[in-house]
Image (spheres, helix red, strand yellow):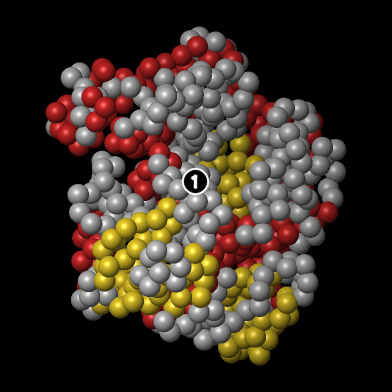
Amino acid sequence: MTFIYGVDYYPEHWPVARWATDAKLMQEAGMNLVRLAEFAWARLEPRQDLYDFDWLDRAIDLMAEHGIDVILGTPTASPPPWLMAQDPTLFRVNEEGRRLTYGHRRAYCPNHPLYQMHTERIVTVMARRYAGHPAVVGLQIDNEFGDRCYCDICRGAFHGWLAERYDSLHEMNERWGTAFWSHIYTDWEMIPTPVATVAPHNPGLALDYNRFCSDSYVRYQRLQIERLRQYCPDRQRITHNFMGFGYPNINYFDLARDLDFVTWDAYWRHQWNMGNPAQASNMALSHDTMRGLKQQTFWVMEQQSGPGGWELVSESPKPGQLRLWAYNAIAHGADGIVFFRWRTARHGAEQYWHGILDHHGEPGRRYHEVVQMGQEMQDIGDAIVGAQTQADVAMILSYDSRFAFQIQANNPSFNHSAHFQEIYHTLHERQVTVDIVPPDADLTPYRLAIAPALHVVPEEVADNLRRFVDGGGILVLTARSGVKDETNTVVDAKLPGLFADLCGVTVSEYVSLAPHAQTQVTFAEPVAGLPATVAVSVWCDVLEVDGAEVLARYTEDYYAGKPAVTLNHYGKGQVLYVGTLSAPIYEVLTPLLLNLAGVQPVFTAPADVEVTVRHRDGRRLFFLLNHAAELRTVTLAGTYTDLLAEGKTVTDAVDLDPYGVCILTDLP
C-alpha cells in the first residue's frame, strides 16, 4: 500500500499548453494522485449524445507520464445547461416550496426519472471508456451529496417508500397518530411533503420524510455504483466525498455502506466558520466520524490549501498550518491527503476559494509547504498507511435523533450537533481517542460509551445498550434520551422510557429553561481540582431515584435538592444519567468518567497540543500536533524514534515549534 498524496485538478479551466507545467510541479511536490472531472459534464458531453473525452484522455495520459494516478469523479453534481433546460421539474424544490433555478450546483432532484436516466448514461459511457485504464485507480460518485427535495416527484416516491415501510395505511395512521388534528389519511396520495406551512407537520411524517430524503441519495448513489461495477474492475475503488460530522441531512452510515472506502472534504477556515475557537476539536470529530462510518482508514479528498470563500475571503492559513492540518487528518486515520485545489480559479463562484497556487499560477509559500510534506510522505508514508486506530471510548451518533431534533428542537438554545460536539470536546482536550458509531454498533470493544440525547430509540437499540452495560461497559445517557419511539411518537411511560431500568431513575418533571437562564448543580463528592458547583442552562430533568446513586443535585428553584446526575449499577456495568444538556457540566463529569472506565491518555500534553495514536505491526505511532502559535513542550513517557527527524531517538520531552508536528514510534 502507498500513502496517497495528491491534489484536485481542473485542466478544463486552463490552456492545454499549461498542463505539462502543472504536472511537473505536482511531481516535484511528491504527488501521486489527482482527482479529475467531477464538475466537467458540459465538457464531456457538450450536447446530448455528443461526447468529447479526448481532452480528459490527454490529461490522464499526461499525469501518468509524471507518475501520477487518477481518481475520476462522475460529473453528476453539476449538470450542463442543455440538460436542465429540458424540464424545469429537474430542479429541486426547497423546504419553503420554491423551485431552484440554474446558476449554482447540486440543484437537481435525485428522484427525477429523467435525471436518473441521464446519470446512468454519462456514468456508463465514462465507465466503459476508463474501465481497466492503468492510471485510473478509483472513482468518486458525484460530489458532496446534498439537500432535501420537496417536489411532486419526491412526494410520489415518498408514498412508495411509506408503502414499503408500513404494512398498511391503517398501520401508518396508527403509528403517526394522525387522529390528532383530524389528519387520518385514507389514500397514500393524500400524504404531503413537509414543506413550510402554518404550523409544524406531524412529527412522524416529518421524521419519515427526512429518512426518505436520506435514502433517496443512498439509492441514487447505488444507481451509479451498479453502473460502474458493470465495467470497472475491483482495483478501481469507489468512494464519495462526505462533508464530515457537521452535515446533518443524510445518514452517513447508510451512505457509506455501498462504498469501498470513505473520503471527505476538510476545511478548517472558510467564510462560514471564521474565528471558531473550537475548530481543532470539531475537525478531529469529523475525522473520527469519517473513520467510524466503515471502521476503516479514510482519505481527505479536499484538504484545504489556502483561504476559502465564495463571496468573502476567509483567514489565510499561517506558515505551517497547511502541513499541520494535513497531519491532523493522518493522525485520526487518513491514508490519503488530496489538496483542494491545485490553482485558484480565475472564473466562477470560487474565485476566492484559493488553491495551492494563486491565480497567477506561480509557486509560492503554500506550494513550498506542500512540497515539504510531500518529501516527508515519500520518506515515512509507507510506515503510516494502514495503521489502525484503537479506541476505548465510543460516542453513539443517531441520525434518527438528529433528524428528530431538526423537526422539534425542544429548546431554542438546544442543537443536537452542538451538544454532541461539546461532549466530544472534553474528551479531545484530554487526548482521549474516540470512535463514532451508530446506535446498533457492537460496543463490546469499548470501556465507555456515550449517547448524547439519544432521543429516538427502537427496542433493539435499547437492548444493544443493555447488553453492553450488562457485560461490564460504562454508559452515559443525557437528558432527552428515550423520549420517542422509531416513529417519533412520545413513549407512554415515564422517561427515560426504555432506559428507565438501565438508569435506575425516572424523570418526574422536566424544565426547559429560557434563553440565558441558569441554575446550579452541586456534586456531592467533587473531583479534586474541579468546582463542586456548576452553572447549567438549556434543560433540567428532575429525577426520581429507583436504585441509582445520586452524584449531583440541583440547588436552586423549586426543584432544589432534587437529583440531577445519577450513577446506576446494572449487571457488571454502570450507567451515568445526566439530567442537563448544558456543556459546562462535562468539564467535571469527563474526568470522573475516564477514571471510572480506566481510560487514560498516553501523554500529558499542554493546551493546544493534540496527541493521537495509530497502531501497526505491534508498534504505536504517536502524532503530536501543536495548534498554538507558540512553542510547546510535551513530556514523554519513555524513549521513542522521531520519524520526521530521520529516526532520531527522543526521550523525556519533545519541543514543538509553532504549528509544529512530531511523529514518534516505539523503538524496535
Q: Is residue 341 above or below residue 58?
A: below
Q: At 79% across and 34% down in the image, what residue appears?
A: 18
Residue drawn at (40%, 39%) of the image: 407
The answer to whether residue 46 is above or below residue 226 is above
Q: Is residue 326 visible?
A: no
Residue 445 percent across, percent down from the top left: 33, 70
Q: Is residue 520 above or below residue 296?
A: below
Residue located at (59% from left, 18% from top):
102
Residue marked by disc 1: 412
Kind of residue at badge 1: Pro
User: In the rendering, at what x and y percent does residue 333 appear?
Assistant: 52, 62
Q: Nearer the viewer, residue 639 or 186?
A: 186
Neighbor class of circle 1 (other Cα within 10 Å; few <14, some 14-19, many 20+) is few
Q: Is residue 251 left or right of residue 650?
A: left
Q: Looking at the image, which residue is at 63% across and 21% down?
A: 103
**Is 484 above or below relative to 560?**
above
Q: Foreground residue, 327 or 606?
A: 606
Where, by quadrant of the figure, is residue 397 drawn? bottom left
Instruction: Residue 645: tell me if it is visible.
Output: yes
Q: Nearer the viewer, residue 183 or 222?
A: 183
* Coordinates of residue 474 in the picture (x, y in percent): 33, 73
Report the front residue among 375 and 524. 524
Whether residue 97 sits left or right of residue 606 in the image: it is left
- In the current view of this chain or complex, which residue is farthest to the front? 558
Instruction: Tell me: 446 left or right of 311.
Output: left
Q: Identify the image quadrant of residue 10.
A: top right
> Regarding mark 1 in the picture, which secondary structure is present there?
loop
Which of the image's four quarters has the C terminus?
A: bottom right
Image coordinates of residue 156 in percent, x first then y, are: 31, 20
